[in-house]
Image (cartoon, rainbow, N blue to C red):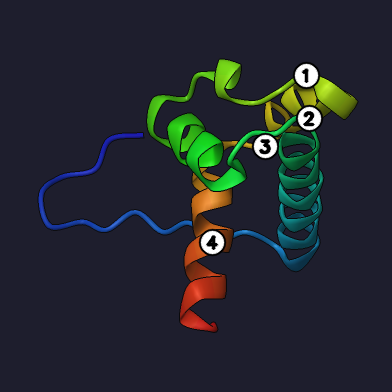
């Protein structure tokens, strides 16, 4: 999909997709905590690099996080942060 200069690409995640992302993030957060990692640092590392090695395989957290695109995660995080 080609877009010329000045064109904004629109992205939107349906409500059920948003709930799925939140559920996965909560499960991954819990698994990271259970294994003694700093969940925020590990998730930031994953978000920046895209490398699933930042996420523990404990409780299938790594396979869960790989089921979601990072742009979907970012949309949920930004929407939640801004209260939208």
**Residue occupying the far left of the picture:** 5
Q: In the picture provided, is 24 more to the left or to the right than 1? A: right
SS for dot 2: helix
Q: In the picture provided, is 4 more to the left or to the right than 16? A: left
Instruction: Name the residue that disc number 4 marks.
Output: 77
Disc 2: CA contacts within 10 A as few (<14), some (14-19) or many (>=20): many
Dot 2 and dot 3 residues touching (CB under 8 Å): no
Dot 2 and dot 1 residues touching (CB under 8 Å): yes
Does residue 8 lie above or below 52 as drawn? below
Disc 1: CA contacts within 10 A as few (<14), some (14-19) or many (>=20): some
SS for dot 1: loop
Precedes in sequence: disc 1 or disc 3: 1
- Residue 14 in view in this figure: yes
> For residue 38, which numbered disc appears in the image?
none
Depth order, front residue of 41/18 = 41
Q: CA distance from mark 4 to mark 3?
A: 13 Å
Precedes in sequence: disc 4 or disc 3: 3
Instruction: Name the residue that disc number 2 marks.
Output: 61
Residue 46 spot, x, y in % from top left: 50, 30
Does residue 27 lie above or below 23 as drawn? above
Disc 4: CA contacts within 10 A as few (<14), some (14-19) or many (>=20): some
Q: Which quadrant would the N terminus be assigned to in this image?
A: top left
> For residue 68, which numbered disc appears in the image?
3
Depth order, front residue of 3/41 = 41
Residue at the image position 50 percent from the left and 19 percent from the top: 51
Residue 10 location, quadrant? bottom left
Residue 41 spot, x, y in % from top left: 48, 40
Q: In the picture provided, is 45 more to the left or to the right than 68? A: left
Instruction: Name the residue that disc number 1 marks.
Output: 57
């Amino acid at each position: 999909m080609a877009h010329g200069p000045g064109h904004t690409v629109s992205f939107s995640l349906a409500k059920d997709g948003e709930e799925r992302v939140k559920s996965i993030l909560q499960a991954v957060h819990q698994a990271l905590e259970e294994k003694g990692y700093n969940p925020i640092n590990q998730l930031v590392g994953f978000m920046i690099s895209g490398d699933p090695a930042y996420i523990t395989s404990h409780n299938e957290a790594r396979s869960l996080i790989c089921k979601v695109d990072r742009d979907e995660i970012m949309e949920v995080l930004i929407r939640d942060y801004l209260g939208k």
